[in-house]
Amino acid sequence: MVNPAGGDGQGPSRAWAGRGAVWRWFLLGGFALVAVVPWMPPMGRQATFAVAAVVAVAAMVCGLRWHRPAYRTPWLLMTTGVGASLGGVMWWTGELALTAALHFPSVGDLLYVCAYPLFIATLLTWARRDRARFAYEAVVDAAVAACGLSGLAWAFIISPIMSGPDLSHRSPGYLIYTLLDLLIIALALRLLFSAGVRTPSYVIFVAGLSLDMTGDMLYYVGLAWNVPALTGATSASLWVLAYVFFAAATLHPSMSESTGSAERVQRIATPARLSLYALLALVGPAVAVGTVVLRGRGAPAVDLIVPMVVAAATAVLLVARLGLLAHFAHRRAIQLDNQAVALNAALHEQQELRAALTAWSLRDDLTGLGNRVLLRDHLDAVTGPHALLLLDLDGFQDVNDLYGHAVGDTLLTAVADRLREAAGDGLLVRLGGDEFAVLLVQERAAAATDVARALVEAVREPFQLGERETMVTASVGVLSAAAPVGTVEALRRADMALYAAKGAGKNRVEVYADALAETRDRRMRLIADLRRALADEALAVHYQPVVDLDTGRVTAVEALVRWRDGTRWIPPGEFIPIAEESGLVVPLGAWVLRRALADVKPWFEQYGIAVTVNVSGRQLREPDIADVVLDALEARAMPGAALVVEITETVLVADVGPEAAAAHGVLDRLRGEGIRVAVDDFGTGYSSLAYLRTLPVDVLKIDRAFVQDEDARGDSTAFLQAIVQMARSLRLRTVAEAVETEAQAERLRQLDCPLAQGYYFARPMPASELTALLARTGGRLEGEAQPTRAA
Ligand code: C2E
Ligand code: CA
Ligand code: CA
């Protein structure tokens, strides 16, 4: 049954506060009562006894109702037990009052004996057994103690009673009482050894039980040895007190938690308990010896046999206890063994895992080669001459963009296989992406350039990827050092050499030299300076006219950026490629565009002159490039017809795949707004003339190589003628670039090329100069007629 305290609000908890103290008053009252018991006559004592029993039963019923323990079987049994003993006490009291004597055995005894099974049941049900394991140890411990006590009981109670002539007719009754008491003591000890709780209520209960048992034992001893003080006041006081304690235990609020807990198994005996065992083991033999010493040879056999049996039983129980302990120790040992085995296995597994992890962290997943970490480890360990080769694939990004990453990965794996062969016994690693490295140490370092060339050669052969044949090339930077230069520095130098190899046209080997470092430093400085120049507007735009070859009329101007760094004019050929690589060309190009539109506005309005602006591949890849261009036009309120966007042929043709599609989309959009698109340096790329059809362009600018090539007249003339005719059929305008002489201009006229641009007509010049020139010539340039400055 569940304690309903939670069910009816605050009431019960207030009631607790009041009832909580009752047990204390009860105990106090009990002690006070007991203090006067010794001075009472037998009848008064008997009456007190009866009153105490009645009050105890009433108090226990109250306690049960107040505290409602969840597990109340033991309490009910105990209350019933005390009730039964009350019946016995009442009978005796009545008998004493009516006949002035007690008969034995009587109905009172019968009732009183009934209390014993109930107490035994109380002790058996108090704690719940552990389902997993029965507490044999507690049973054996209790049995050992009971054996010892029974030896004492035999010597001091049973044997004297049995041999005493007056008591012999009562001895069976007392024998039963004594044995029941011993059983109760044994069970109480077992509970003591195994109970899982130590609540105040439990302690009071055990104390009450001890008082009761002590009272019983003293009573029997008093009977056996004829000591009236013991049979009278002493035992009576103890019994009254026992009732008081039982009642107090039931009244104490902790009673609800005292019962029903699981047994606690104490497998290993404490030193105190071991000492007790030793003492108890001596009881049997001591009693036997005492009997022989005190009574001599005349002692009856049973007086020797019983102590011996007690001693033997104690010995057997202790052996059983040892057995339990050994069993437990053995099981624990096996458990520990298993744990040790499991622990070992786990440790081993962990070690393997760590080794795998280390190996894994040094390996490149895709190719199975070592990785950057491994290379660093080896570089750190270098002591003598060594060479570090850094290899980077040229144009790998195109393969990735064109065919997707899966094909890119396959290519990388295939490249790694070839490099593995070419690198020989050098340490080959993949640094990431399409970058690889080879480390050669000691005498192998001397062969560094040979190995580097072998690497480049190995990659140059076409790769067969599924049905597709792909070509890539590789650039290699080599650092050769006679002694360690430090890991970071070695990587830096090899990287510089690699960069130089890329700069020198790729597909080649470049060896580090200190001069490279200077080039690189200059480059870095240049980027920084250019960034500043852009911010400070230290850049300028010059304009070079494009003229109609027949009429000399200026139809357009090309915007060409200029950078004045202090006193020096830095040519765009020197900084545009760097600006492209660093991405600086994006803001730079936007600036040129805005500047050019501002400058060209009056010329456009007066002479119909459009402006041609160079747009690099890097700019074209910017997602917002079309918006940037259209916004710039709108800002100047100019139509699309005023602008020509110039893109080199290589950008238009080489950029295949999704990016090229995006670029073509941008150009389509610009053309939709009336902006024209020109292909710059036409003829240097690989586009066939037929391919032109598919490109979103309006103007072809024929590269200077075909314009200025006068010696090989046949070939270039045929080519020029083909371009011009093809362009005309496609409704494209052609512009011949870099026309420097009258002869070149004349040849172009003959070939029917409509437009031309070059020093022969005008050099690039600042906007103010061009304004003056246009005003002077009325927008018509006749070639040589203009004064040309030295180049
Ligand atoms: P480009 O687009 O081919 O420009 C024409 C180049 O040829 C200009 O060199 C021009 O000065 C030069 N030139 C013109 N007429 C003659 C001639 O009769 N003989 C010779 N030998 N050369 C002539 P510049 O200005 O040094 O520009 C070099 C390159 O820099 C340009 O080549 C263009 O690709 C790039 N560039 C110039 N300005 C810009 C710009 O604003 N943005 C971008 N992205 N690139 C630019
Ligand atoms: Ca150009
Ligand atoms: Ca050009």
Image: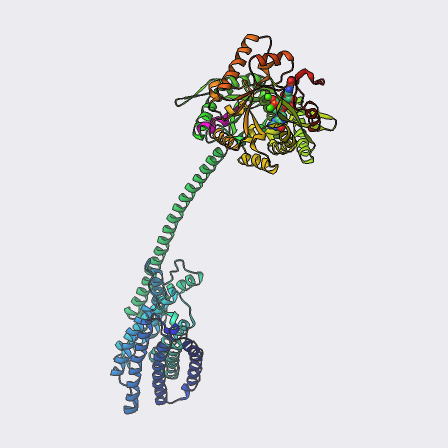
Name the residue located 43 percent from the left edge and 30 percent from the top edge: 406
Q: Which image quarter: residue 530?
A: top right
In depth, the one of 304 and 276 nearer the eye is: 276
Taking the image as shown, residue 768 lies to the left or right of residue 702, namely: right
**The C terminus lies in quadrant:** top right
**The N terminus lies in quadrant:** bottom left
Residue 621 placement (x, y as % from top left): 53, 32
Marker count (numbered): 0
- Judged from this view, the residue extending furthest toward the right is 567
In depth, the one of 364 and 356 nearer the eye is: 364
Q: Main secondary structure of the magenta part?
A: helix
In depth, the one of 209 and 392 nearer the eye is: 392
Residue 772 placement (x, y as % from top left): 71, 26
Residue 500 in view: no
Residue 220, above or below 509: below
Asked if residue 112 lies in the magenta stretch, the reply is no
Magenta extent: 392-403
Taking the image as shown, residue 192 lies to the left or right of residue 627, namely: left
Tell me which colouring the rendered structure shows. rainbow
In depth, the one of 251 and 110 nearer the eye is: 251
Residue 547 placement (x, y as % from top left): 62, 21
> Ligand 1 appears in which quadrant?
top right
Asked if residue 393 lies in the magenta stretch, the reply is yes
Residue 233 in view: yes
Q: Which image quarter: residue 174?
A: bottom left
Residue 197, above or below 655: below
Residue 332 placement (x, y as % from top left): 38, 51
